[in-house]
Amino acid sequence: MTMAYTIEITRRVVGYRTPQEVTPEGETCGGQWMDGDARTIERPSTSRAVYDEFDAQTWDDDVIAWAVDAIGPTGAVEPSSCPVGTSVPEHAWLSGRYDDPYEGDNRVTETSVRLTDDWSPQERADVFHALDRS
C-alpha cells in the first residue's frame, strides 16, 4: 500500500491600502492604509502536489526532500506555532508573504501551506525544521 502525501498550497492576493484612482483633474486619491483590513485583489486559489512514483524515484524515496523542494519556492516558511517540536499536528500550516516590488503593501501575495493525508506528525516536523534551515 502506498502512502498519500499531499501538499496543499493556498494563495491569495490582497491590498492593505484603499484603491488609488486619478480624478478628472489628474490628481491621485486613495492609497490610505486600511488599519489591518485588506481588500481582495485576486480570489484565493488552492493547488495540491501529490507525491507519486515519479517523485519517489526523482527524490530517492525521500518525501521530506520532495516537500522541501516543493514548498521552498512558495516562500511559506513561517510555522503557525512556535517552537516547532518533534511533532506537528495536521492542522498546523506554514505561511509566507510577498510584497510586490512596485506596489508594496498595495499588492501582497499571501501563501499558506498544509501537509495533509498520510503525513505523520514527525514527518511534518521534519519538513518544518528543514524549511527553517533553508
Image (cartoon, rainbow, N blue to C red):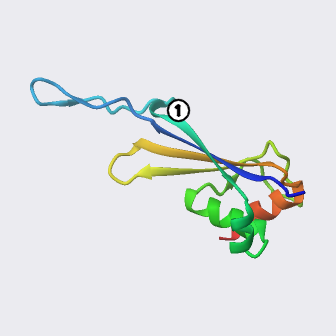
Q: What is the three-letter code of the residue carrying label 1?
A: Gly
Q: Is residue 128 left or right of residue 86?
A: left
Pick the front one: 36 or 11: 11
Viewer can see residue 97: yes
Q: Is residue 108 left or right of residue 7?
A: left
Residue shown at the point (69%, 70%) measured from the top left = 133
- Which residue has dot 1 on it? 36
Pick the front one: 82 or 66: 66
Residue shown at the point (33%, 30%) measured from the top left = 19
| x and y, in percent, of residue 2 in the image | 85, 58
| Crowdedness near tag 1: few (<14), some (14–19) or many (≥20) residues, C-alpha within 10 Å | few
Q: Residue furthest bottom?
A: 60
Residue shown at the point (74%, 64%) measured from the top left = 53
Q: Is residue 118 left or right of residue 128?
A: right
Q: Tell me where residue 17 sits by quadrant.
A: top left
| x and y, in percent, of residue 86 in the image | 89, 61
| x and y, in percent, of residue 50 in the image | 70, 54
Q: Tell me where residue 64 sits by quadrant.
A: bottom right
Q: Is residue 102 above or below residue 28?
A: below
Q: Is residue 57 above or below residue 29?
A: below
Residue shown at the point (75%, 76%) measured from the top left = 60
Q: From the image, which quarter does the C terminus lie in?
A: bottom right
